[in-house]
Image (cartoon, rainbow, N blue to C red):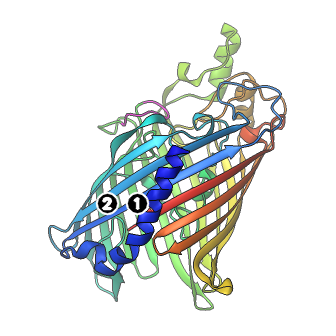
Amino acid sequence: MGILYRVLTAASLLAMAAPAWAEDGAFGLPDWLAIHGQGTFTLQGDPDFRSPYVGPNSLRPGQRKETIDATLYVGVQPWKGGELWVNPEVDQGFGLSDTLGVAGFPSAEAYKVGKKHPYVRMQRLFFRQTIGLGGDAENVEADQNQLAGNRSADRIVLTIGKFGVGDVFDTNKYAHDPRNDFLNWAIVDAGSFDYAADAWGYSTGVAAEWYRGPWTLRFGAFNLSKIPNGETLERNFGQYQLDLELEHRHQIAGHPGAVRVTLFRNRGNFGRFDDALALGAVTGTPPDTALVRRRMSRPGVSLNIEQEVTDSLGLFARAGLTDGQIEPYDFTDIDRTVSFGGSLKGTSWSRPDDTVGLAGVFNGIAKTHERYLDAGGIGVLVGDGTLPRPGTEMIAEAYYDWQPVKGVGLTLDYQFIANPAYNRDRGPANVIGFRIHGQF
């Protein structure tokens, strides 16, 4: 309760100060300098559910866990079109079962590394250069990692340094920000998109974007972690990811929408499930992909759609597929996924800044992947020690985000998880969450 009291106190101060910050334009700083910030507290619990057995990576019933993070966004403009951003962050807390037990994990605010005491990390440090190519002028509002100003509709954008693959690829207006919309990993991103990242979700690399009319072509090259799901990134692209994305923006009945197709190719030391099973059969031990890793590639593709239906209602959908014969590397244990949902602003009930959201996701794995888990293998997030009755992992999420003042949101979140970790013997689990978020 002490942590919750401190967070509620901080949220109250943010509520009183946020209108002044917004009116003054981030403290009235010069145009070439920007300072923004955010703080998020998330509390989740899973009441008791059917659990006849548990393994090393199982979701355990009857928990309550919280996470806290606070981020500072400082940007400078050394010359026209150039931006240098730094994002130091304070983190603390744990996800349910130490962020294990569900492939579509219920909190994207919970990192794969949890700690009892607050610690500081430099999550982003990158440079962005925008080169105008003509076309209509677009107004850009000040935001986190975005300077206010104008830009050409046709342009090239180059980003280099440490940042998130998801900052550039697989974005979606209605499902991509666990601090403001949905929380589930497989809803805010395509679950099969095994994007390069350290245990906190960031990588080092370069991305190039070419905007031309309604089209955008994106390309990126990023370092994978040194070992799957690791804390340390490669530094010389010894193990790497290549990303390619094509986006088309359109309007239907005057309402904007977008379609994105994203391809990725991971290249590094990975293990095949069949090889791990064969070795385990010979040695009489549980299969372990770490023992059979060798140089290979793992590709994948995903489709991402967003569409505004009315001024208040927006819909989204994603679908993804990757090579299920090879172990996932940096994200989670999902070989195929379909998600869909939408969000509705509270205009009709006189709360235009409030949002209600509803989404569902179906996650699956290849048969070889199922056999690996049934034989006692463990993955990035899942592994109950056995999997005698595999099934599709099905998740529904609903939230209501109440904004008492601009920049401060209090959210109630509920997730229903059937067959957690693809296991029909366990669950269903009900995850109830509460989130406080403030930003300026």
Q: Which amino acid, by three-letter code, is at mark 2?
A: Tyr
Please tell me whether residue 229 belongs to the stretch shown in magenta: yes
Farthest residue to the bottom: give it: 254
Q: Nearer the viewer, mark 2 or mark 1?
A: 1
Q: Of the residues under marks 2 and 1, which one precedes in the sequence?
A: 1
Measured along the vertical axis of the image, is residue 401 above or below residue 192?
Answer: below
Q: Nearer the viewer, residue 290 or 421?
A: 421
Rendered residue at 50%/42% (across/down):
111
Marks 2,1: beta carbons within 8 A: yes
User: Which secondary structure class fits the magenta region best?
Assistant: loop
Q: Quadrant of the N terminus?
A: top right
Please give the range of residues in magenta.
Answer: 227-233
Rendered residue at 65%/29% (across/down):
57
Q: CA distance from mark 2 to mark 1?
A: 8 Å
Q: Label for residue 73?
A: 2
Q: Which amino acid, by three-letter code, is at mark 1?
A: Gln
Image location of residue 105, percent across then percent down: 63, 45
**Mark 1 lies on residue:** 38
Q: Residues within 10 Å of mark 1 (few under 14, many from 20)?
A: some
Q: Quadrant of residue 306?
A: bottom right
